[in-house]
Amino acid sequence: MIPHPHQPKAPSVMLLLLVVLMAIVPTSQGFVVPSISGSSYVRRAITLHASTAANKDASFSNGASDGTAPSYGSTSDQFHFPATEIDDVNTPPSFHKLSASLKSLKSGSDIRGQFVDHQRTGSLTSVIHSIIDRSSSMPPLTPLAAYCFGASFANMVKQECVDKVNDDKLIKICVGLDPRPHGVRLADAFARGVEGVEGVQAVYNGLSTTPSMFEFCRADLCDGGAMITASHLPEDRNGIKLFTKSGGYTKADIDTLIIGAIREARHWHDFGVLPPTSGDGAVDCTHVDFMPHYRNRLRDAIIAEVGGGDKPLAGLKIVLNAGNGSGYFFNDILADLGADVSNSFLLTPDGTFPSGVPNPESTSMIAETKSKCEECCADLGILFDTDADRSGFILPRTVAKGSLSAYEPLNRNRLIALLSVIFSSSSPGCTIVTDSVTSEGLAKFLTADLGLEHVRYLKGYANVIGKAVEITESGHGNAEMAIETSGHCAMKENGYLDDGTYTAVKIVGLLARTYKTASGGSLLDLISGLQEKAEENELRMNVLDGSLESTQDLFDQFARMIEAHTEGQNKVEGWELDTENLEGVRVRTGGGGFFMLRKSLHDPLISLQIEGDSTDEVRSAVISPILDMIRGDNDITNGLDIDVLC
């Protein structure tokens, strides 16, 4: 059995160290190590221990007074340590790399990176090599990292559950995952990290959705939840989303989590071995199935939305595209409530994603779902991302007796508008919080047409949710919904839980209520007042060196250049700087058109979002002026892939 690094070393090892230390004589020149017969390995070990002791003394904190590395012993028995090998806290370069890799995994309020495996047993050296010996610049998410995050999370949850600790009750943390094959490896490592903390138990829920993790916490099935997922990102990526009864983790929580993970990693680094693991295909902790609780809750919510009945969705034909992700179970709920779901597809979880990683904004996923809806004359198409915390929809534009046609996507500004129609009826005058990239037309529709308050805030689902909570709790408004154009949506009535399946509950409920009325009609008719631009595009420019530091520098330079062309002698005709914008730089171009430059939250790229009346108008009003201003700037033209602008 491998002991935890917090446990003391075996007495025999301690005795050997004591004997060695007694033979070491401190002098003004360092520590003299008497000549010892035996292997050079033993001599190096003694010298290393002497250097450690010296570095713990303030007089040796940074080597000799002249800045050179200290020497130990007589001229004939010296062992030199390069200045880079140790520092004032005795941190070797190998651990610096490990520590830096843990820090790099922060992605807003989540942990995200590229899955990087390593050997199951042995030294931490293998982890360092796995991190270094690869071509990718993506942050590496290793099983060791997952273990350390598990231990750190367990300690944080334990601090939050003071009453349980005082009553000697076991604290329970639930671990779930999406279908990615390497999720099992990470879940096992995370669970073992959790159970390395006294008084904390890990339970494994298997295939889960991200919103279900929070539901399990607030339903008191567990005290903390960890979802192993990378959502819509490529299949080689993975990540960790964390919850407690208080809600999802914030950016500040992730900072604290990383500090604890680094501390745990240091213990194992000093101990010299990898934490234990169960190997491939197994998660070694108590297994549970909490998903029936979550399914029943969603089922009851649909019944409540429609107004009761055993089969409230009878007569409706709904197509679900689960994208081989975790949201497949929603199809069973729809069928149980009477809907015809015979044309739903990609319901088998498959982490290789044969049809592509599910993303409700993906043009291919939209086209595929639209085609299925057209084939069967569906009343509604539903699209989920991998972990089902985002959704999108397909609706018929024309609804006549026995005929549905001209199917169109309901996403982005349209989805926000339709959900806001629902809340304008149930909660008149409420506040809708959106991200920074919503359209000018949406702002007018929410405020002028629906009489709602619109707060355009920062991009990032945690940001909009946090702002909605702040508005409501402060009494400055009643924020019924926080939503991103990407489809992340959290509603006050659902505890501000970011839940794509609950968004589907609201749309399905509205459809069922409308279906029962004599007038019927398309749900798209309810947002006919939304002004939409014919040309809506997002151009993504990759940062050529792949670094986030360069991304920030290039963005700052680009943004300053654009701002300089919204006023004075360099002003581009028609450009007006949006001074209320809180993220990136946003410029109105007249007639409800705009463009916005912003850097990605997660990747080395800079995005240019544009809305206008036509391709020609966008090129003349936005693209051409931008190309003219950056052509003379070598930093931007050499640092960014601007081919998408040409």
Image: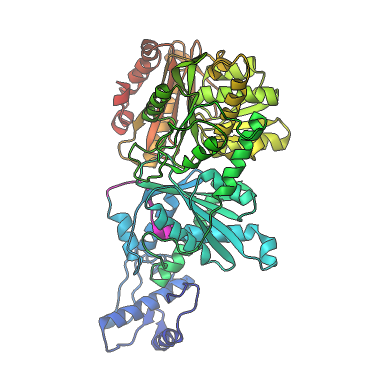
Q: Residue at x 42, y 70 (%)?
A: 270
Q: Quadrant of the C terminus?
A: top left
Query: The magenta stretch spans which residues?
Result: 135-146
Could you say which quadrant of the image residue 143 lies in? bottom left
Residue 446: where, in percent of width, then height? Answer: 61, 20
What x and y, as percent, mark residue 484? 53, 31
Q: Along the horizontal axis of the image, is 492 left or right of 108?
A: right
Q: Which residue is nearer to you in this view: 439 or 493?
A: 493
Vertical placement of 380 versus 18: above or below? above
Left or right: where 296 falls relative to 10? right
Q: Can residue 565 be seen in this view?
A: no
Q: Is residue 323 magenta?
A: no
Q: Quadrant of residue 28?
A: bottom left
Residue 201 at what x, y percent from top left? Answer: 56, 63
The N terminus: image quadrant: bottom left
Residue 589 or 511: which is nearer the viewer? 511
Above/below status of 333 relative to 139 = above
Rendering coords of residue 250 (x, y %) = 56, 45
Residue at position x 48%, y 57% in the image: 149
What sort of colour scheme is used for the picture?
A: rainbow
Q: Give the total of numbered labels.
A: 0
Q: Nearer the viewer, residue 101 or 152?
A: 152
In the rendered image, residue 143 lying in the magenta stretch gets the answer yes
Residue 36 seen from this side = yes
